Image (cartoon, grey):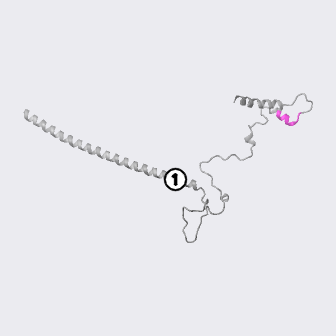
Amino acid sequence: MLFGAIRSITRPVTRAISTRPSFISTSPPPPQSCLRRHLLWIPPSSGAFHSLTDTRFPKRRPSDKPRRKRASLKPPGPYAWVKYVPGQPIPANAPNEGSVKRRNEKKRIKQQKSFIMSEKKKRKAQVQEAKKKKLAKRVERKMAAVARERAWAERLQELQRLEEEKKASMA
């Protein structure tokens, strides 16, 4: 990790130094080296301007919905070949050997769907049962509250009657 960082720092510097024209030479430098001398801060094979000079198309980004297949890529002919005797119905469970594409995958998908539906039915039955129990408990609570109210009303009448008898006996 450390060596890679040091290498990436030193590589442009060493290239810039190695491509610098020599000052001992009496002949005029070629035009490219003049340009290189003025632009020493740009490393020669730097990836800094790669995206500006790249002419290729960018990579396709992942999308939220799959691309539609082009019709030209689809091979001609039926999806699956099935044996057929004129006048007899084609059994659904006996196509040609190897003619049904994605047979195992379809079977797995059907099993998954049937399992999900059975679990859904179980869950629905459990929820209905729980709702029935909840409603029954609510009705029981209401009936108990009504019974308590009646009992309290009867007890109150009895207490008032006892109070009146007490007052009558005192007076």
Secondary structure character of the magenta stretch overall = helix
Q: Residue 162 magenta-drawn? A: no
Residue type, label 1: Gln
Residue at 42%, 50% in the rendered image: 124
The stretch of residues the image draws in magenta is: 29-36
Vertical relation: 9 (above or below) 112:
above
Q: Compare residues 127 and 57 and report the one nearer the observer.
A: 127
Quarter of the figure with residue 93: bottom right
Give left or right: position of 97 versus 169. right
Q: How many marks?
A: 1
Q: Residue 35 magenta-drawn? A: yes
Residue farthest toward the right in the current orientation of the protein: 26
Residue at 58%, 56% in the rendered image: 103
Where does the C terminus fall, quadrant-wise? Answer: top left
Give left or right: position of 10 versus 31. left
Residue at which label 1 appears: 111
In percent of width and height, residue 39 lies at 80, 33
Vertical relation: 8 (above or below) 126:
above
Where does the N terminus fall, quadrant-wise? Answer: top right
Residue farthest toward the bottom in the current orientation of the protein: 87
Residue at 85%, 34% in the rendered image: 34
Q: Compare residues 51 and 89 and report the one nearer the observer.
A: 89
Give left or right: position of 139 versus 82. left
Give left or right: position of 69 versus 107. right
In percent of width and height, residue 106 lies at 56, 55
In percent of width and height, residue 145 lies at 26, 42
In percent of width and height, residue 144 lies at 26, 43
Assign a secondary structure to mark 1.
helix
Q: Residues within 10 Å of mark 1 (few under 14, many from 20)?
A: few
